[in-house]
Amino acid sequence: MRIDNELIKNEVFICAQCHYCRVCPAYSVIKWESTSPRGRVYLLKGILKGEIDAEITAVEDFYKCTTCGACEVVCQTSIPLIDLWERARAEFVEKGKAPLPVHKKLKDYAEKNGNPYGEKREERAKWAENFALSESAELLYFAGCTASYRMKELAVNSVEFLRKAKMDFGYAGVDELCCGSPFLRTGQREIAYEFFRKNYEIWDRMGVEKILTSCAGCYRTIKRDYKEIGKELGMDWDFEVIHISQLMWSLVKSGEVELEEFGEQVTYHDPCHLGRHMNVYDEPRKVLESMNARIVEMESNRENALCCGAGGGLKSQFKDLSMEIGKRRIEEALNTGARYLISCCPFCKLHLKQASGGRIEVVDLIEIVNKHAKV
Amino acid sequence: MIDHIPQRSDLTQRYLYSHDIASPPIISKFFKLADVVMQPENEDDVLRILLYAKEKKIPLIARGSATSGYGGAVPYKGGIVVDFSRMDHFEVDEERKILIAEPGAVWWDIERKLNKLGLSLRVYPTSAPSSTVGGWIGQNGYGVGSLAFGSIAENVEKIRVANFEGIVETRDLRFYAGLHGTTGFVVKAWIKVKDYEDLNAYAFHVDVEEAIKIAYARKHYSALYLTRRYLEMKNMVSGNEIPEKDTLVIVTAEKLDGDEELGEEIWNDRFYPLRIRRAGPGVVAAEVLIDAEKLKAYLNSVEGFGAGTEVWFLKNSLCSVLSFMPVDERDGRSVFKYTFSLKALKEAKKLGGRVYSTGLYFSKESKSFYENFDELLRFKKSIDPENLLNPGKVFPSGSLPIIMGFLEVLS
Ligand SMILES: Cc1cc2nc3c(=O)[nH]c(=O)nc-3n(C[C@H](O)[C@H](O)[C@H](O)COP(=O)(O)OP(=O)(O)OC[C@H]3O[C@@H](n4cnc5c(N)ncnc54)[C@H](O)[C@@H]3O)c2cc1C
């Protein structure tokens, strides 16, 4: 197999093979080098040197990674590993070695319905039926696929909170399309570019200037990937993108929203797409502190936080592995003695809730904040 | 007999388990790949693998995290790579201040647990975030704390070893430590630890003579000396602005009048000596042990080649000196730069120094490296007559030692 991507060609030779990236949640479970970040880098280097080809099992193992970025934080030589994984996966797709079957199925669904869940396009905005949301505004609420179809309570709570905060905002309804995150993460870039173009068109038509997401994955994609895709396609990209945790904190800090006391013992799970990928660690914690919640940090937190196990296409393709990682995170949460495990991402909530088996209450920050926001 | 032991023999896995951190050009092209990788989960598994290998006459290569660069963990003649990563259990005898660890336990996991108990490792390598107990004993070496406490071998109370003879528990490490698994696999180690203490790091901009005086003036925990050239390389790749001057860092429980902020900054980065690979991309390293008295002369010669150096001051006025030259592995013309390791060794030997470790690449040095080499050779022959335990390592065999000797002369 030939590798054309320049990032890969340059960076893999910088790797020291020091194995600090053994912190990888997938490798910690599997314990075979083909799933360790340094093993994956060594494989790419071997392919470039013509010493080995990417066998099917190697490609499969390459995908046993949540792209959580824990490896990047500890990397001896500061290799941008998250980008490297995504670019390598795109190379595998280009050269016909991937996508893996389930990832391909998600793409087929998305091509047809605009979401990877195989749900009907016209049902996307069902959660919003009782709200009569505006279809144009400077500020757009982007609900994303998971909150639209699977974790509707997060979209509902978000909108209720925005109303309480007297924010003027719009929502694209059934015109909203998947942000493309699952496809960028699994190397199926083409369809993500298509979603970029279509979403962009709609936002342009709606007069949007600022985009608010309650999903960490959408936030990462729209703020970081869309900016790059826009640049690549020579399009103007001047949307401001914020995550709802940032909005909550700015409203609380300025006194525009007051929150009732929430004096519970809680622990906060940093979603990879919000924390490591985008450097948002403080705002959710500050919101909780402002409510007098007693935060007990888990053994691994902030940039070293253990991934929930769901991201990067892992949950869809490798359920057992994904669940095992989720359970390890739940153990960390239980060890804090907290009553609530709070996160800021529908995908994390969904997965951690499943992994918890009801042993701890898993909630999203927006649910707590909306419930305690004074009208 | 061994079917239940986690193992893989697909090409990808064999490829991924057939190297360590060094990438020597040309010669590595002649190395075989591992035939299979096995991950024993307990001592019984290790004994079963030994029995199997003896029966089938297959080489066995011990592997921790493969973070060493002497080829010790490289299965260059094929065989079974025995990866100890699943045997990573450890416990602490708090009263006796003894750590009892399986070979795959990782130093920094141990240190974190020890700190919670008010204890701390006496010594650990700067690869501690990933390297293992078995790997460091297998290679033997110095690291953080070695100014006060010496090598890892000096801090091991007892080891339990598995080889073709069965299990041995011994306090006499001479037949196992630093022998790269050629005489048996360490399956458990009892290691001395110390009370936790708050340590401070202080930086001093001093020349090498002054650095030696400060390092050995009192009983300090650790002392690290970085040359200007090394700091230049580090700044270049990291964007840091560490003053580009020869710098000594002393780590101690005492209060000193050095620059604490800079000391901490450098010390906090101690696990990242290879950041400078970005300059190449890649580096060729030369690592020697030399007496402090000869350090200045040695540094003059290696820095003359354009290398940057870090020096660890050790007990008994010994220094471990690690010099780096950037090299672009992709560039065929850079092959000659790899002779730097040999040139540096030649200089060190002229000054009474020696190579840091033997492993595969420096087995030609073993006779002078191990004080009891003849005794070791007899021992090796008696317990492993078929030479199946990591063949080609430590005990010179085949053409590689001759090639390396030849290259050293040429360099
Ligand atoms: C960033 C970095 C910093 C480093 N800093 C230091 C340092 O401060 N000091 C230092 O000495 N080295 C250092 N090294 C080199 C290396 O990390 C150490 O030698 C380390 O102890 C090797 O441990 P490992 O688990 O990776 O062992 P491996 O590299 O896997 O093995 C090392 C040797 O031990 C043998 N071995 C492994 N397990 C066993 C066993 N159970 N029984 C018998 N033999 C066994 C192997 O066959 C091999 O010969 C550094 C390396 C890096 C990348």
Image: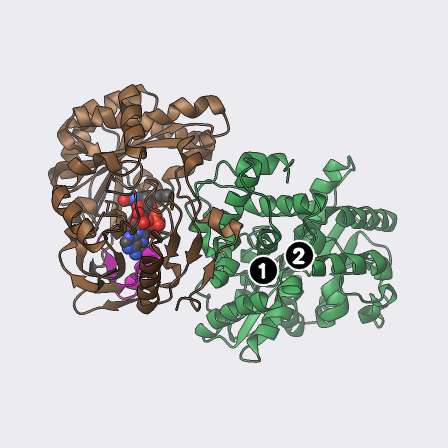
Q: In which quarter of the image is the N terminus of chain A?
A: top right
Q: Where is residue B122 in the image (x, y as percent from the top left)?
A: 21, 54
Q: Which of marks 2 and 1 is nearer the N terminus?
A: 2
Scheme of colours in the image:
by chain
In the displayed orientation, state which residue is furthest to the bottom: A358
Which element carries disc 2, helix, strand or loop?
helix
Q: What residue type is labelled 2?
A: Gly
In this view of the protein, can residue A260 be seen by the observer?
A: no
Q: Name the residue under label 1.
A: A271
Left or right, residue B386 beside residue A49 = left
Color of chain B here?
Answer: brown
Question: Could you tell me which quadrant the C terminus of chain A lies in?
Answer: bottom right
Q: At x 85% / y 66%, what residue is drawn?
A: A120
What tint does the image give chain A?
green
Q: What residue does disc 2 label? A: A217
With B379 as the anchor, is B92 left or right in this view? right
Identify the element where label 1 is drawn. Answer: loop
Residue type, mark 1 in image: Pro
Mark 1 and ligand 1: say if the CB distance to the nearest ligand atom is below 8 Å. no
Residue count near mark 1 (Cα–Cα under 10 Å), binned few <14, some 14–19, many ≥20: many
> Distance of mark 2 from mark 1, alpha carbons?
9 Å
Q: Residues within 10 Å of mark 2 (few under 14, many from 20)?
A: many
Magenta span includes B105: yes
Read off the magenta span.
B101-122
Chain letter for mark 2, please: A
- Above or below: residue B163 compared with residue B273: below
Q: Nearer the viewer, residue B387 or A114?
A: B387
